[in-house]
Image (cartoon, grey):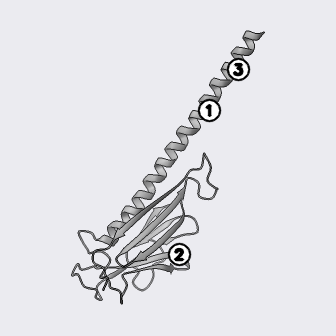
Amino acid sequence: MVAISLIGVIALGAASINTFSQLQVASAVRRAQLQNEISLVLEHMTKQLVGRLDRGGAIGSVNDPAVEINSTILGNPAFRARVDANSNGMADVSDKVIGYRLMPNYEIWYYDDLGPPIPGSASEVLSTKTVSWQKAHSDNYIVITLTSRWDPSRSASIDNPEITMRTLINMPAVSTH
């Protein structure tokens, strides 16, 4: 009788360890996928604001800011940036205004050209799991913090991990004078 009870306790312990380890592996995989998604969004923002091969980055000055961080696009939280479309190093009429918009369905939409009229659809959907973002702007720097969850409609838990990542973007074409 004691031997049967002891075997039962050992089997129950092994099953518990197996269940726990499967949950931890699934959670780690989900965290890694979230981290990958957020890092790609932050990298996209950095490339647009710093500059690309085919166009310059955000351009402006203290009197004519390059970035508007507390903006809205069609009623949703957003931020806009004027980028040097012709790479001439000057803010002029040929520059484009790009934007990032946080949608109520947890998506981040990227707009490649917000010139009139404002487009009804995004150039690209960058994320589908973003629950919040914070933005701060000072001189020629912008700090962006993104928080994402595996299932953004549910609260964070062991099987619904939440990841927060932050980046500091230096915009070299933005004058601080």
Residue 45 visible: no
Residue drawn where x is 66% and y is 19% of the image: 10
Residue 93 versus residue 105 in the image, above or below: below
| Circle 1 residue | 19
Tell me which amino acid carries mark 1: Thr
Marks 2 and 3: which is nearer the front?
3
Marks 3 and 1: which is nearer the front?
3
| Circle 3 residue | 9
**Which quadrant of the figure has residue 47?**
bottom left
Residue 57 versus residue 125 in the image, above or below: below
**Which quadrant of the figure has residue 137?**
bottom left
Q: Secondary structure at mark 2?
A: strand
Binning the other alpha carbons within 10 Å of mark 3 as few (below 14), some (14 to 19) or many (20 upward) gives: few
Horizontal side of 128 relative to 96 (left or right) equals right
Q: CA distance from mark 1 to mark 2?
A: 41 Å
| Circle 2 residue | 77
Residue drawn where x is 59% and y is 29% of the image: 18
Query: Are circles 2 and 3 on residues that touch, CB within 8 Å?
Result: no
Q: Secondary structure at mark 3?
A: helix
How many labels, in total? 3
Tell me which amino acid carries mark 3: Val
Percent from the top left, x then y, of residue 174? 31, 79
Q: CA distance from mark 2 to mark 3?
A: 55 Å
Residue 172 visible: yes
**Which quadrant of the figure has residue 111?**
bottom left
